[in-house]
Amino acid sequence: MPLSDYTQYAGSALIAIPTLAFAWHALVTRRTYADEPPLEAGWIPWLGAGLQMRDLEKFAVEGYKKHGLTFTAYAGGRRMVFSEDLAVHRSVVSSKNFGANQIMVEIQLRFLGADRPTTKQEEAACVPVLHTQLAGRPLAHLRTAFLERLIEAIDDFKNMGVVDLIPLLRRTIFKCTLRAIFGRNFPADEALEPFYAWDRGLQNLVSGKKDPAAIKGRDELEKLVGDYLRDHILETEPVIQKQWNDLERLGTPFTLRVKYVALGFLWAAAANVAPVSSWAMAFVYNDAALTARLRGELAKADKTLELEMLYEEGAPSTQWVAQETIRLTMLGSIVRPAARTTTIEGSYGPVRVRKGDLMMCTSWSLHRRYEDPEEFIWDRLKPVPGEDASQQFYMAFGGGLRPCVGRSFAYTEIKMLVLAMLERYDVEPVTPFPRLMKTDRIGVGTMEPSHPWMVKLIPRSSA
Ligand code: HEM
């Protein structure tokens, strides 16, 4: 065939391929059904809205403004359904058509670095144990152990003088939480830096990107936790011991036991509650009227209560402070793939979702549907008698089939920190109160302070 014919064919192909790609894109990926959420498909075939999604927060916020509470985005061959509708979030976490287990498998493989996901038997030895032993109520001994360690730790603040309050409390809660769960001798000081390095890389690891610093942190932490558990398993919470022993009986190798039982729980237990409680404390100290109110409630509380019950129930307003802090500072999302094409109930009627769609339930933006969302209003979530609106956009702990098992322990920890500190210290601010800054990991984690909040810690004479 003469060369000119080849050039002619190549020229036609150059025109035909993009034309077909655009036709396919227009007919298949951009096609929607009446009850499906509006589609943001972009104009570039396959890539779709991928480029806009590099700034996920901006993309989601603009998408909600343009399309309403729920919309679909097409990017890189995948459809994602973004929603800030509480009704959709509830339906997704409660329906077996959305794979919570599939997400856990991704987390085990990529974030925990396991070389295989748990088998069905291993899953049965772990998840129901967590849910029956920890969900819905803080175990009395866990609460006692935590408070004991907390009081020891904050007693050490007496001679510190001027401190950067938020990170100081964050480290304190991290250590006390882990020493309550894994035992008094857990090397929490050494765990801190590797944990932060690993946690900072969460999003990279889960999305399959390279993050050598996060992997190094995780490896160090895994070694530390593994070495500790070899000799101290009997000092850990019964929920850890039971899973550990059951997996050992099933023949699960040591390294996988460390990952499935200890590392996953360690992250879930410490990653959110430590920063959230330190923000709660900072908000309270920054508001003289609120500080006085909580101290007043404690002063009127029943003095015959044991200390942990006093902190749990003695100042009821701390519950709303805790919830409002979580609403304002948490940046998490619930992510679930749809296992089949299904229709769920949204606030404004049925929402049809296709098999394979990735549900992106953006809790961080749902929590911003209140008025003045960036303000800390301590009693915003306190139910008003006769109205049912206060909690209408609040869903911080997931729900349905696999909710957070540490929910009530998390509230307990926040209350204990706030009240134990209020009883023992006043603060004198040295620098202005920081603004809350979203991190570049939106979808996971918590807000960061814009600058250190330096305060002088002044021990109270009554403590
Ligand atoms: C402010 C603090 C906390 C927040 C906002 C939070 C939030 C959540 C959310 C949203 C989930 C569900 C994730 C999903 O469905 O994809 C979850 C799961 C979980 N949380 Fe929490 N959590 C907190 C504290 C804790 C604490 C203190 C513990 C342990 C003592 C804990 C242990 C867990 C565990 C083990 C799971 C996984 C449950 C399962 O596998 O079924 N969390 N958490």
Image (cartoon, grey):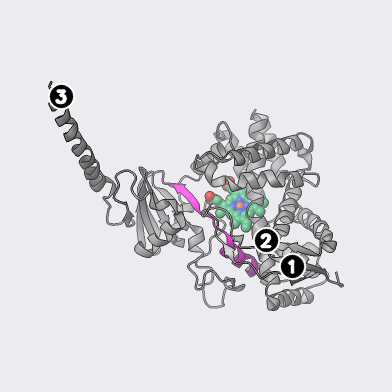
In reply to whether residue 400 is colored magenta, the answer given is no
Q: Nearer the viewer, residue 263 or 54?
A: 54
Q: Amino acid at mark 2?
A: Ser
The image shows residue 226 at horizontal and vertical percentages of 71, 35
Badge nearest the viewer, 3 or 2 = 3
Which dot marks residue 219?
none
Instruction: Mark 1 and ligand 1: say if the CB distance to the nearest ligand atom is below 8 Å.
Output: no
Which residue, given by chain and number where applicable, does mark 2 sit on?
277
The image shows residue 389 at horizontal and vertical percentages of 50, 72
Q: Amino acid at mark 1?
A: Val
Q: Residue at x 72, y 65 (%)?
A: 454
Q: What is the CA distance from the residue labelled 3 to the residue labelled 1?
A: 79 Å
Which residue, given by chain and number where applicable, does mark 3 sit on?
3
Badge nearest the viewer, 1 or 2 = 1
Q: Amino acid at mark 3?
A: Leu
Which residue, given by chain and number where applicable, does mark 1 sit on?
455
The image shows residue 76 at horizontal and vertical percentages of 37, 43
Q: Residues within 10 Å of mark 1 (few under 14, many from 20)?
A: many
